[in-house]
Amino acid sequence: MKNILVFGGAGYIGSHTLKHLLNEGYSCVVADNLIYGHKEAVDKRAKFIHSDLLDLTSLKNIFKKEKIDAIVHFAAFAYVGESVIDPAKYYQNNLIGTCNLLNTMLDFGVKDIVFSSTCATYGEPLYTPIDEKHVQNPINAYGRSKLMIEQIFKDYERAYGLRHISLRYFNAAGASIDGSIGESHEPETHLIPLVLKAIKGEIEAINVFGTDYDTKDGTCERDYIHVEDLALAHRLALENLYKYSGCINLGTGISTSVKELIDAAKELSGKDCVINYAPRREGDPAKLFADNKKAKQILGWEPKFKDIKDILKSAWNWENNRKF
Ligand code: UDP
């Protein structure tokens, strides 16, 4: 049985992946600095270590004490807007933190890593659906920090034999089907939780950022991928590191507009919400959706949740019974 270090396992995608790995029989050690993560999200079957990628002593101690076979690395700051205002925070944490992790794991002879990357590494798309060959030209420090890490992996592969898969997520969405964990950000900036909060009356209205895009209805189109499908892809990536290193998109390949998403949420809940049509949000591309053929070819991965209503249903269930 493999022992996996899930760094950032108290976060949204990390905690769902952790649960999936444990269900599949892996043993897991979780490390998280709990700045944005939630201790309550960490499955009790895993050992939890409070650690930070910028604390080299603490990193070394993990590898000294635990016999780690591979790493799934989620630990990063992920607020795009903040990364533009304060890029230093993003390069320090995301980039330098990851170098610390890489250097430490290699010092201890660990060569396998699955990494949370993002479609934000592509920047403004030149064509859709976006495949992995699309030029990468990120438009914010968050995306650039992730791209730099992808590039470092290639150098480390050549020089030190690192085995790596970077999973470029499109829009992570939904919650665990058993209702035990889900999305919980503070502050919350993502469309789905905000729409559901508007429907519940917890916020006054949902802002629709931009209605004049060149899209099917003028609002932005995104590819919402269920967090349990992401979790599955991380396990498959771990299991395929022996034969493949590189980057893989994770999306459904289906695009949903902001308006379509709000309508689906209203239909699902049977409730209305106030919509505030607002100007475009800076840095939002009109359309982002994935060509996911590579994930199918290399990982044998196929998303189980393709209908936005099913994705929203799990998010709605979580929003109404959330534990943190
Ligand atoms: N969006 C919106 N209102 C909000 C939050 C987001 O209209 O309050 C739009 C945003 O412009 C984007 C889409 O919803 O087109 C998804 O945004 P989100 O922040 O959830 O994810 P992103 O695509 O930025 O990673």
Image: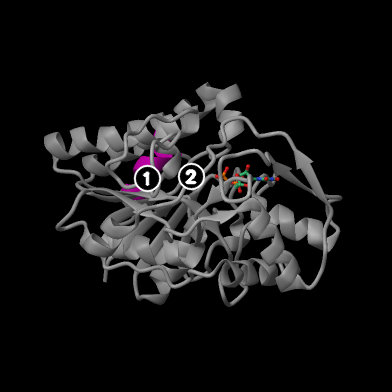
Residue 30 in the image: x percent, y percent? 45, 56
Q: Which residue is mark 2?
A: 51
Q: Is 170 displayed left or right of 162 in the figure?
A: right
Amino acid residing under circle 2: Ser
| CB within 8 Å, label 1 to label 2 | yes
Tell us which disc is closer to us: 1 or 2: 2
Other-residue count near label 1 (Cα within 10 Å), few / some / many at <14 / 14–19 / ≥20: few
Q: Residue at x 40, y 52 (%)?
A: 290
Q: Identify which residue, 15 or 139, lies in the foreground.
A: 139
Task: State which quadrant residue 137 falls in.
Answer: top left
Upstream in sequence: badge 1 or badge 2: 2
242 lies above or below 96: below
The location of residue 183, given as percent across then percent down, is: 62, 58
Task: Measure the alpha-carbon separation of dots 1 and 2.
Answer: 10 Å
Q: Main secondary structure of the magenta part?
A: helix
Residue type indicated by callout 1: Asn
Report the side of 304 relative to 207 (left or right): left
Determine which of the numbered discs, if any, sits on residue 61 in the image.
Answer: 1
